[in-house]
Amino acid sequence: MFVAFILGVVEGLTEFAPVSSTGHMIIVDDFWFQSKDLFSPEVANTFKVVIQLGSILAVVVVFKDRFLDLLGLKRRRSQDAVQLGRGGHLNLLQVLVGLIPAGVLGVLFNDYIDEYLFSTKTVVVGLVIGAILMIAADWFRPRRPKAETVDQITYGQALGIGLFQCLGLWPGFSRSGSTISGGVLLGMSHRAASDFTFIMAVPVMAGASGLSLLKHWENFTLDALPFFVVGFISAFIFALISIRFFLKLINRIKLVPFAIYRLVLAAIIYFVFIM
């Protein structure tokens, strides 16, 4: 159970922060292999999908009103947009526009990515280049954001963020790191780019995780179920904490502190696991 708890914590804290959950899973590889010793490799890999669902649920909870609005179940309007005299409103089509580029590339190159890009060296490269992008985003962002809130983004910005999201297909680059950086460079505030990033992540991750669970449903055995439950709950709780904390801080601390953290993480992985 301790193994399940630790893996859930790591997943929850790192899945949506711009620090690369893949990079952190390399650090806790010993725990990951313990899970494969406890159960078959198929069950252990299914566990990884389960804890991702815990993180996804945390995003749904944080943005529940926003998702109800997007689905037409509860009408809301950004008070910030109203106060700024901009009556814009995020809609489902903008989210879909942002999802298309990475969705298409992911389908076309999924097998190639799995076979050739998932290695410790490629993760280190992703961590470093992603950090450089984040620093560049803070240095070269427009002095005054064109979109202070997510309700003020344009279709062009949504598409642009979608294109930046393609970089997140490279392991270690971080989906949130690439999209938040892209959003900032395209004239969004850090908070608006973060909100849009988290909203886009739910359909992508939920769809992929759902399909994976359907393929491996037989792995939900009685002896493995407690392991899954502990990992799911710990991932949900710590993702909830991480997301709320991140959203409160991001407009103040920006991206550079996360970039520095990524460079330190890349150095640790390089010297410990590659040299």
Image (cartoon, rainbow, N blue to C red):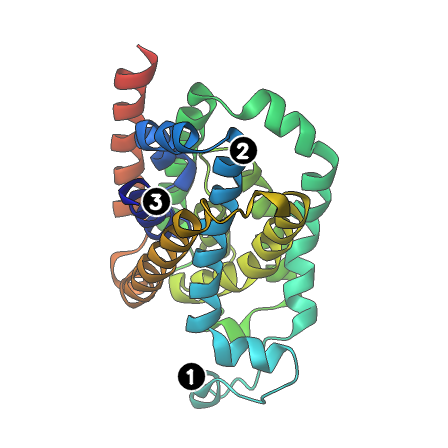
Residue 120, image quadrant: top left
Sequence-wise first label, 2 or 3: 3
Residue 178 in the image: state x and y as whole percent.
48, 45
Question: Does dot 3 land on a helix, a strand or a loop?
Answer: helix
Hey, which residue is sitting farthest front in the picture?
Answer: 222
Q: Is residue 150 above or below residue 14?
A: below
Q: Which amino acid type is marked by label 3?
A: Ala
N-terminal of the two: label 2 or label 1? 1
Q: Is residue 4 left or right of residue 118?
A: left
- Say which amino acid is labelled 1: Asp
- The residue sitting at 29% across, 63% down in the picture is 241
Of the numbered discs in the image, which one, if any, rests on residue 4?
3
Q: Earlier in the sequence, mark 3 or mark 1?
A: 3
User: Percent x, y for residue 16?
Assistant: 41, 53
| Secondary structure at numbered mark 1 | helix
Coordinates of residue 36 in the picture (x, y in percent): 43, 30
Q: Which residue is mark 1?
A: 80
Image mark for residue 256: none
| Quarter of the image where the C terminus is located | top left
